[in-house]
Image: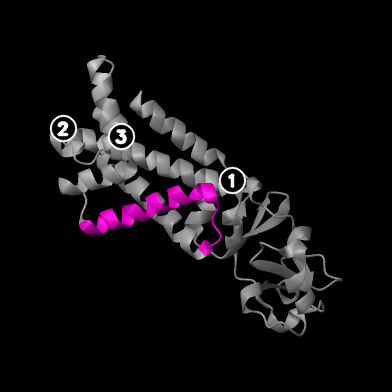
Amino acid sequence: MQAGFHDAMLEFELSLDMSLINNTLKEVTVYTNDDISEVLNNPRFKGHSRLLVRNADVEDFFFEKNVGVIEKDNCATTGKVKDCMVPVRGGFVEIHAPIVYFIEMNVPYAFVGDDDGIRGFVAESDLLKPAVRILAFTLATHLEWFLRRAIEVHVTDERTLQKFISGRNMSRYRDDKRRNTERPLTEYTELYGEIEALKEVRFFSQEDAEELHTIRDMRNGLGHGYSDIQDFIPRLHTTIKWLEQLANILGY
């Protein structure tokens, strides 16, 4: 059953694909002679950190002399789009590839497409979309499942684990025990206590624990929505890193 949960989580994580965060080229395209102040103030582009640039009479988005990107935060507020355009340096990702692949590419933007050609464009700002928040919550839940498996192996003294279970949950555990309906102690733990219990038995170092707590902070903030992509992306990378490490350590 445990392996089944792991497999189901992995399957779901990989099912969240690039089509869920893709922007059509029309949605994110501006033109070289557009007024930059109008572009920056256009509500249509709100939420997009980067936009594609092309000449009005050019159809081929891979014709480099006529394609660029503007990074809105780095543009002056006056002038033409072409004045703050930079060359395309992004990669390519298949439209049905898992979103996690784009995260692991660690590029600021990429073209999205299939065998028939380019279908769209994604940038870091698209990682704030709902599908990615769902993915992040799923990854954090998967990570917590691994922590509980590690506790089962490495925290052999129940008293050690009980130190890191909240008073409310310990009360529930005692009530369940009186009714002979108690579950394993790991069913009463929470992410903070799981990290601290594993640190207590030296499964994690202090540095490891601090890094893992940033994942907990990310998960707790997901319900409120993230606005700082520079904070969110590193925590996504950290979550993926620890999932891979714990899977290797625990033999999954």
In this view, the mark in front (3 or 1): 3
State the quadrant of the C terminus: top left
Number of the label disc, if any, that sits on residue 233: none
Tell me which residue sits at (61%, 57%) in the image: 126
Camera-near label (2 vs 1) is 2
Residue 124 in picture, x, y percent from top left: 57, 61
- Tag 3: amino acid: Arg
Q: Which mark is residue 158?
A: 2
Q: Amino acid at mark 1?
A: Ala
| Along the viewing direction, whichever of 173 and 132 lies nearer the viewer | 173
Residue carrying label 3: 168
- Comparing labels 2 and 3, the label whose residue is closer to the camera: 3
Q: How many numbered marks appear?
A: 3
**Numbered circle sitting on residue 131:** 1
Magenta residue span: 206-229
Cα separation, mark 2 vs mark 3, equals 17 Å
SS of the residue under disc 1: helix
Residue 245: percent from left, percent from top: 31, 48
Whether 221 is among the magenta residues is: yes
Q: Nearer the viewer, residue 99 or 73?
A: 73
Q: Do tag 3 and tag 1 residues touch (Cβ < 8 Å)?
A: no
Instruction: Identify the element where label 2 is drawn.
Output: helix
Figure quadrant of residue 36: bottom right
